[in-house]
Amino acid sequence: MPTVPLIDEKAASPAVRAVFDDIKRTRNTDWINNFWMALANDPKELARVWAQVKQVMAPGALDPLVKEMIYLAVSVTNGCEYCTFSHTAAARKKGMSDAMFMELMAVVGLANQTNRLSDGLRMDVDPQFIPRG
Amino acid sequence: MPTVPLIDEKAASPAVRAVFDDIKRTRNTDWINNFWMALANDPKELARVWAQVKQVMAPGALDPLVKEMIYLAVSVTNGCEYCTFSHTAAARKKGMSDAMFMELMAVVGLANQTNRLSDGLRMDVDPQFIPRG
Amino acid sequence: MPTVPLIDEKAASPAVRAVFDDIKRTRNTDWINNFWMALANDPKELARVWAQVKQVMAPGALDPLVKEMIYLAVSVTNGCEYCTFSHTAAARKKGMSDAMFMELMAVVGLANQTNRLSDGLRMDVDPQFIPRG
Amino acid sequence: MPTVPLIDEKAASPAVRAVFDDIKRTRNTDWINNFWMALANDPKELARVWAQVKQVMAPGALDPLVKEMIYLAVSVTNGCEYCTFSHTAAARKKGMSDAMFMELMAVVGLANQTNRLSDGLRMDVDPQFIPRG
Amino acid sequence: MPTVPLIDEKAASPAVRAVFDDIKRTRNTDWINNFWMALANDPKELARVWAQVKQVMAPGALDPLVKEMIYLAVSVTNGCEYCTFSHTAAARKKGMSDAMFMELMAVVGLANQTNRLSDGLRMDVDPQFIPRG
Amino acid sequence: MPTVPLIDEKAASPAVRAVFDDIKRTRNTDWINNFWMALANDPKELARVWAQVKQVMAPGALDPLVKEMIYLAVSVTNGCEYCTFSHTAAARKKGMSDAMFMELMAVVGLANQTNRLSDGLRMDVDPQFIPRG
């Protein structure tokens, strides 16, 4: 039960449809997931967010699967249910195995643990960790 | 200004020193960072957390640099200052370039943006994203 | 499925009923939403929280719709499902249009993105941003 | 460097001074910490927040030290630096030993770890955990 | 709908079954909750996390009910649904009354409020709160 | 002490300088704050994030001061120090008075409190709050 109506392809304005078409082409898929159909209530925001996803998640200094797993790690840390399912699916499509998923979870769990231990113990940052300008 | 005194190597009990020595050996380094010296106020917790870090961050289905960048992505998302510096340093030591760091930041920023858009728009999870048992 | 039973108006003690009546009168409505019925398990906490909501959300230096949208922005950032629905409904009742809701979401998404970019890049606060005492 | 000027006892209006006096009397102390001096920029909010702290943190079904440690656990989980120091000091004043502090940190770390593992693995809530109405 | 299949006792490998048996023995119960069945997809992580829970949650400087309530306070602050139900149930089993639960909620609510007020007002930490080394 | 070097206007490439110039022109100011100088380590990300800020924060269905206060509410809720100072300064420049700032803080504090009370009490969303499609 979303807070806004979903705009499907049939109801989409030409501007929205152009983004939907680019999503399908870029991802080599034939359907649009609910996130984009909800975001389409603001066609400019839809275009802005999609342009970012398209550029940031493209191959670069990091490979797409690594990026997708980083995306998933953030989504899990934020407790975002929709994002956890959608980025787990996306990472699996890009090659994440069962073992990789479980190992990713172990790192995420550990990082959350030591992050909060650090926030409680409040050590100064070691000088060795500070980048030299 | 930590909330507990730091236990350095000279003041360490044999149990603490054994963990410190294993940290140095495993990481091929000659110093102990403040996190472990603070955690050493509870030698059992020190041993437990180190055992986890040693096992979880070892090579496995994911390579150590990827794990370190996932650790960093979580730390940034949690706003943990100490962790951001320590895991940036660790990732750089394992080969993270300037371009990789900035790309990681771009993914983390984007994931936080779309996570909260999803939390506001509250779409149902698409059936296509639900794993088949 | 709440963690506590909901206390409805019929089962309410006089102290709880007095708060419920004030909620209905203040909001010009004839029903009590689940949050207050759950909180009524602790009548003093019910009274304390309602007194705050009544005072803080009243017209003041900021107008009530702006306050309600700020409340919603926080709720979305915290990923609170109940709060997102209840404060979206409250803001709409006070005049938030579809366009205002989507624009609010765009700001919340952007803020979460740049917040975490800042937490990763860790710049010092510019002297120009520090208030002069 | 706070975002607002601190209102000290000399500069305080009678309404603010009344709250400051009640804080000192209730806590059996002779100084006011920076949180209240910052909050005093809004005398009504100062009075509201102090009234809550006074009531909620008083002895009740839970003893004051337990409440203070719960307060600290939340503060650490939220990464709030000021709160971590102030509630560590408050808990120590109420009897928290070094061993209790470190054990509290271990629980907080563990809870953050398993919280995020749960958020990633997304199990249904077991029927046995659902309260019977 | 978890992101991984649940491994029940019949399907469990000997290593997983040994952990399951220890969970049941330690908790004096005859069933395994979904968290452990999901985590069992990585038998080493299952063993690591259970070993921690067993050690950290055992009686020590803090009593088990206090620890369980701290665990619950963190889970609520993180908005983790599964964890909120499972640790509410665990705390009730260890003796948390209705009044204790509601009082715990009041502390958690208040702490989240003043944490964010502090994060907005940004006062320096009072020297009196800084531990002397 | 940022994790990356700051790129100032003199050291900026033409692409970065074009963004810096647009920031100064749009904001009618003669200096660039540290966030943009850090982000300039990735000129494409700098351009993407600035394009979003420029578009999303422009007048629309919501006025710019309201948007800036929403941005600030999110920043405080996330505990982002840099963002809290920079968006407090930005909101003041757009007309936020002392009273408005303190009232904004009161709403943010209250929302964080009731968000977490809701996350602990776990009521179902009232049918009245669910948008009709």
Image (cartoon, coloured by chain):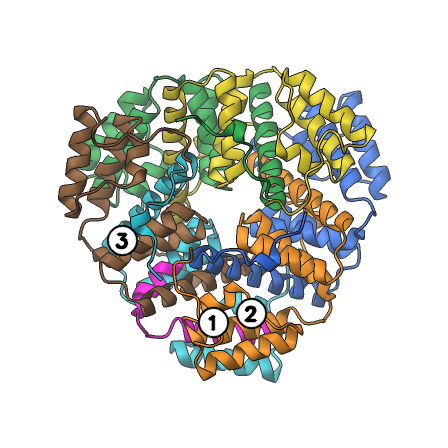
Chain colours: A brown, B cyan, C yellow, D blue, E orange, F green
Q: Quadrant of residue B44?
A: bottom right
SS assignment at label 1? loop
Within 10 Å of disc 1 (Cα), the crowding (few <14, some 14-19, many 20+) is some
Q: Amino acid at mark 2?
A: Ile
- Establish if D69 lies above or below C103: below
Residue plotted at (45% across, 20% down): F66
Q: Are marks 1 and 3 on the same chain?
A: no
Q: Quadrant of residue A100?
A: bottom left
Within 10 Å of disc 3 (Cα), the crowding (few <14, some 14-19, many 20+) is some
For disc 1, the marked residue is: E8
For the residue pair F118 and D133, the one nearer the viewer reads as D133
Residue plotted at (42% across, 49% down): B77
Q: Is residue F64 left or right of residue D2?
A: left
- The magenta span reads B43-71
Q: Quadrant of residue F30?
A: top left
Which image quarter holds the C terminus of chain E? bottom right
- Establish if F14 lies above or below E39: above
Q: Is residue A25 visible?
A: yes
Residue E52: percent from left, percent from top: 57, 72
Within 10 Å of disc 2 (Cα), the crowding (few <14, some 14-19, many 20+) is some
For disc 2, the marked residue is: E32
Cβ atoms under marks 1 and 2 closer than 8 Å: yes
Q: CA distance from mark 1 to mark 2?
A: 8 Å
Q: Is residue B119 left or right of residue C64?
A: left
How many numbered callouts?
Answer: 3
For disc 3, the marked residue is: A90
Residue plotted at (31% across, 39% down): A34
Q: CA distance from mark 2 to mark 3?
A: 31 Å
